[in-house]
Amino acid sequence: INTLLFSQRFEQQQQRQKTMDRTLLSRATDSSDAPTPGYLYVDIAKNAASSPVACQEMAQYLCRRLQNKQSPNIKFKVLKVICKTAQSPQTRGHFQRAISQDASAVSAIKAALQFRGPMDPARGDEPNQRVRTAAKEALDAIYS
């Protein structure tokens, strides 16, 4: 009977575990030139710290977004979110571990180190350089 009660409680806790907030991440990594508001980084870190499942889903979502989008603005913002979330004390290293153990995430960040997108007519290579710099910062944050 005790085992049955324990398993029922465990299942209830699993159902209550939070998952990632996709709208929060999509707002933080939109394609506009406007910078991501600072409060979103805090909210994302809190969401990642809410449960290991949310942390893992968030890492996978950001990895897919980094791999599949070619906009330098999106790539820059994704890398910035990875960097800020990995550095946040709220995640207690769980996010760093989730990213570093995912080979596709690490390879996507390393690929961003070599990012060469189309030249911007007004700003030249500056958006692409920002992506490369943010990729370096993200790797430093993950492995620090």
Image (tube, helix red, strand yellow):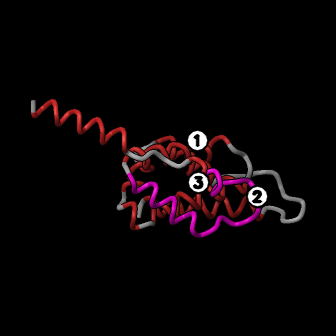
Q: Which residue is mark 1?
A: 64
Q: Quadrant of the N terminus?
A: top left
Circle 1: element type = helix
Would you call the spot at circle 2 few (<14 residues within 10 Å), some (14-19), or many (20 or more)?
few
Q: Which residue is mark 2?
A: 32
- Residues at marks 3 and 2, CA–CA distance in whole angstroms: 15 Å
- In the picture, measured across the screen, residue 90 lies left or right of residue 29, that is left
Q: Which residue is mark 3?
A: 24
- Which three-letter amino acid code belongs to the residue tagged 3? Leu
Front: mark 1 or 2:
2
Q: Which residues are magenta?
A: 24-50
* Residue 40 on image: x %, y %: 57, 63
- Return the residue nearer the eye: 14 or 31: 14
Would you call the spot at circle 3 few (<14 residues within 10 Å), some (14-19), or many (20 or more)?
some
- Which three-letter amino acid code belongs to the residue tagged 1? Arg
The earlier-in-sequence mark between 1 and 3 is 3
Q: Are marks 1 and 2 in contact (CB under 8 Å)?
A: no
Circle 3: element type = helix
- Return the residue nearer the eye: 69 or 45: 45
Circle 2: element type = loop
- In the picture, measured across the screen, residue 57 lies left or right of residue 125, that is left
The earlier-in-sequence mark between 1 and 2 is 2
